Amino acid sequence: MVALLRTIVAALLIAGMASGVLHAQGRQLDSPHTWLVQSQASYVLVDSDETGWLNGGFGKLRYDETEPSVTFDRLFIEYRGALTPTLLAHVVVDYMDDGSSDFDIQEGYLEWRPVPRSSNRHRFKLGAFYPRLSLENIAPGWDTPFSISSSAINTWIAEEVKMLGAEWSLQRRLGSAGSPHEAGLFAAAFYANDPTGTLMSWKGWGLHDRQTRWNEQVPLPPLPQLQPGTRFSQSQAPWAEPFLEIDHAPGYFLGAEWRYAQRISIQAAAYDNQTDPLLVAERQWGWKTDFKHVAMQISLPWNLGLMAQWLTGRTIMGPVIGTGTRIVDNDFEAAYVMLTRMQNGHRITLRYDDFSVEDNDAFRMDDNNESGDALTLAYVYDHSDNLQIAVEWLQVDSDRPAREYIGLPSSSTETIVRAQLRWKLLDHSD
């Protein structure tokens, strides 16, 4: 599946370069070809007794106290361009110091925008992409322009929810011409998301800015059932690989949205990977995971913006055991409220997150219950067209009984202060 994805992305890049040459010669295309290369580096201060999740612990942050003070967070290359007047391509590849490989794929898809023949505007997308449920991660490279770290909801989406499939969407203005009301529908069928739920269940929620790539393995905490020599460890590796296809059956994602005069936006959507929870491949179990979400964005006076999102779902894995439940059966829920203000290139953002996991099974030594909240205060300054400076304070309080398995208290408070520079090394349009 990953080899196929790499082939598709390579073909998109080659087609984009070839189309760019034709565009430069003939100047016949309406949409430009844009190449963006951006790097991100941070100065980090962490106050936490937790081992970071990328180092195999229960930490909620990207970094822990063992990390160097200066970190290279990410380098990404993004291409957007028109292969024909109605066919567009979008590709994102990136490199991270804490990645399990060098440059790898984040997104790569084609989007067809046929010429409208009525009030309905259709779009069709094919390839690898995020589900359209984030009002927060709208910057290039699926970053957030409001802060450094994403909310708990969108952090989880970046960790283990991504699609390889096809999406249809429709936009229509309601009422007469010039009406401020606009409605939309969207639906997708996808593959390669069968282990989704692994990180949610065994690691729990997190708040950070890291995105899992398509060919990546990320570590799991040192849970008793995953230790070498246990029966369960024979079928489950001590890492998660979220973007695998195990049961060769498609999942679906669908939703609706309403906008009013670019001032109010409301979206509701549902996701179900429809995975068979009894199957195992490459030491990764299939997790049947579904969720629903509602999001809202409102533009307020004085350049203020209000944003809120709520997500609730369930994930199950394994056969029904003697207790009458699956090996793993968890409900999960999270919500955030964000207030942001932009003025003359200066943005200040305040966000509150609340999150939980409820363990419904009776499997011994696998307590996945969790509760917590987080407060984020961020400042972002557009210094120039090519340089952005961001400073963030983030504190996460969480209670997870599974920490006691390795001799830690169940409750933890983690605080991080980051100052990040974002350089656009190349921002070219032809």
Image (spheres, rainbow, N blue to C red):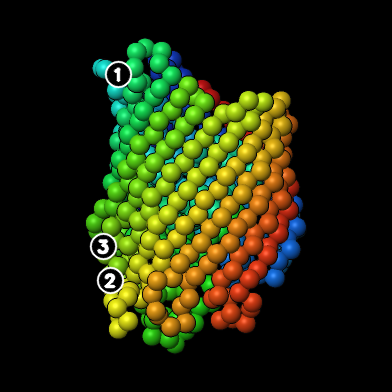
The quarter of the displayed image where residue 278 is located: bottom left
* Residue occupied by mark 2: 278
Number of numbered callouts drawn: 3
Instruction: Give the mark toward the camera: 2 or 1.
Output: 1
Residue 53 at x, y percent in the picture? 58, 66
Determine which quarter of the picture holds residue 236: bottom left
Query: Quadrant location of the N terminus?
Result: bottom left
Q: Is residue 134 visible?
A: yes
Give the residue displayed 53% in from the left and 67% down from the top. Answer: 370
Q: Nearer the viewer, mark 1 or mark 3?
A: 1
Earlier-in-chain disc, 1 versus 3? 1
Three-letter amino acid code of the residue under disc 3: Asp
Distance CA(mark 3)–CA(mark 2): 9 Å
Q: Quadrant of residue 193?
A: bottom left
Q: Residue at x 74, y 63 (%)?
A: 47
User: What residue is disc 3 on?
Assistant: 247
Which residue, as the protein is rendered here, is positioned at the far top?
177
Of residues 371 and 89, the one nearer the viewer is: 371
Helix, strand, or loop for circle 2?
Answer: loop
Place of residue 33 in the rendered image (x, y in percent of width and height, measured from the top left): 47, 26
Q: Position of residue 257 (x, y in %)?
A: 39, 34
